Image (spheres, grey):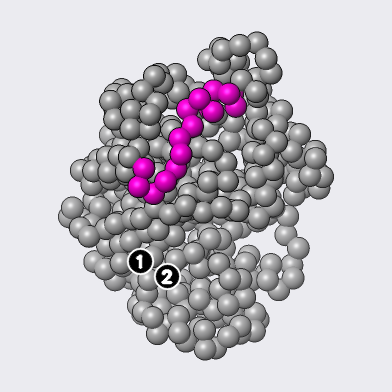
Amino acid sequence: MTDDIARSFVQLALAIDRHRPGYVDAYYGPPAWRARAAADGPRPLAELELEREALQRAIAGDLGMERQRRGHLVGQLRAMQATLAILAGETMSVVAEAETLYDISAEWVDEASFEDCRRTLDELLPGRGPLVERLAAGKAAAQVAVEPNAPALAEIVRELGRRARDRFALPRGESLEIRLTQGRPWSAYNWYLGELRSRIEINVDRPIDILRLVHLVAHEGYPGHHTDLAIKEARLVRRRGWLEHAVTLLESPVCVVAEGIATRGLDALLSRDELFAWCAAEVFPRAGLSGLDPRREHAIEAACQKLLGVRDNAALLRHVERAADHDVMAYLRHHGLCTEQAAAQALRFIDSARSYVFTYRQGGALVDALLAAEPAPACWFARLLEEPVTPSQLRAWIRDRSQGAAPDRGAAHRGAAR
């Protein structure tokens, strides 16, 4: 019965994608299923909702399904219900979207935290001019020309890949390629192709500083999205036969955990001292930036990362308060220390991504809270890569640990061989 549920789930996802192209972010299941969805064309939404309801009942009635697998599917189906409702014309606020699609709360971030970051940057950046100009000048001094075969980029991919393979259960034969693109609302994107392969596109609309390039490769590749999806394909789809993981959806709670993994991946792979030593010895010289101080550059990047909540607030201004372009961009420039060009790109992303914007900061916060409660954080980061986890389950794990209880080891984790 469980195999039938997995097949029905994947086929329903492919059918929804016919109404919302891009809903299926990656698919590496049987080609015949995708061919059938294409041949059927867009099917009536009411018919798809009936199928979703029948699938929900089937899951409830399958008493032999592993608890963790069930929790993952239930969360996916709840998000599917919201997607189908939106496609049918239901008006849903961005706050309701975040809750129903992603299992998180879209909350206003206290602006006092932004002022703390500004004070930190004010101390790190030389000069007495406007802070946004000093930050732009500091990043300009660390900028690197991004080319697929550039020595610095090749070193970043090589070393992060080596460390990810040593530390986590990356399957043999996995690989990724880097391509450059322009005119996108995002900085970089991982297109998971299946068969353990990824294509990572880096947007070169704006110059990229060298440490930001390290973070992008970690986020999209090692040990971020590529690592996450390659391990799950190998362990869940190939080894366990859980075919529901042969499809990744852009509107689902899984996205929050995936962005949490990607956002905190570099910290899971290298200690700060390891990062500083590597950048000083290999990365910065290969980019022609030997004079940069890696500790200072890291401190600047870390402070900028703490300004991620500015984008969350800007999204609420845009989608809840219906703020105009110039007001949202002014907020991004003032609190986020964005240049005009960066603010315009951030606004494009906010408009295109809507409630997805909130998955980055909240995913990172959930992963931080879990790892902070664990005596062996690397093992728990590995669990996130290997198991189907939802934000609700992460919150339960965090609550259990705060109360001194040991969370379940997980069906996907038990007996898993490297």
Mark 1: few/some/many CA within 10 Å (<14, 14-19, 20+): some
Q: Vertical placement of 246 versus 68: above or below?
A: below
User: Dot 1: what SS?
Assistant: strand
Res. 27 mark: 2
Q: Position of residue 172 (x, y in %)?
A: 20, 58
Does residue 308 appear in the picture of this structure? yes
Q: Is residue 174 left or right of residue 149?
A: left
Q: Position of residue 215 (x, y in %)?
A: 43, 38
Please give the range of residues in magenta.
135-150
Circle 1: residue type: Gly
Does residue 62 appear in the picture of this structure? no
Q: Quadrant of the N terminus?
A: bottom left
Q: Nearer the viewer, residue 267 or 218?
A: 218
Res. 324 mark: none
Give the residue displayed 58% in from the left and 35% down from the top.
308
Q: Position of residue 270 (x, y in %)?
A: 31, 32
Residue where numbered disc 1 is placed: 194
Q: Vertical placement of 326 versus 234: above or below?
A: above
Q: Nearer the viewer, residue 413 or 235?
A: 235
Q: Quadrant of residue 161?
A: top left
Circle 2: residue type: Tyr
Q: Magenta includes 231?
A: no
Q: Please tell me which of labels 2 and 1 falls first in the chain.
A: 2
Q: Quadrant of residue 115?
A: top right
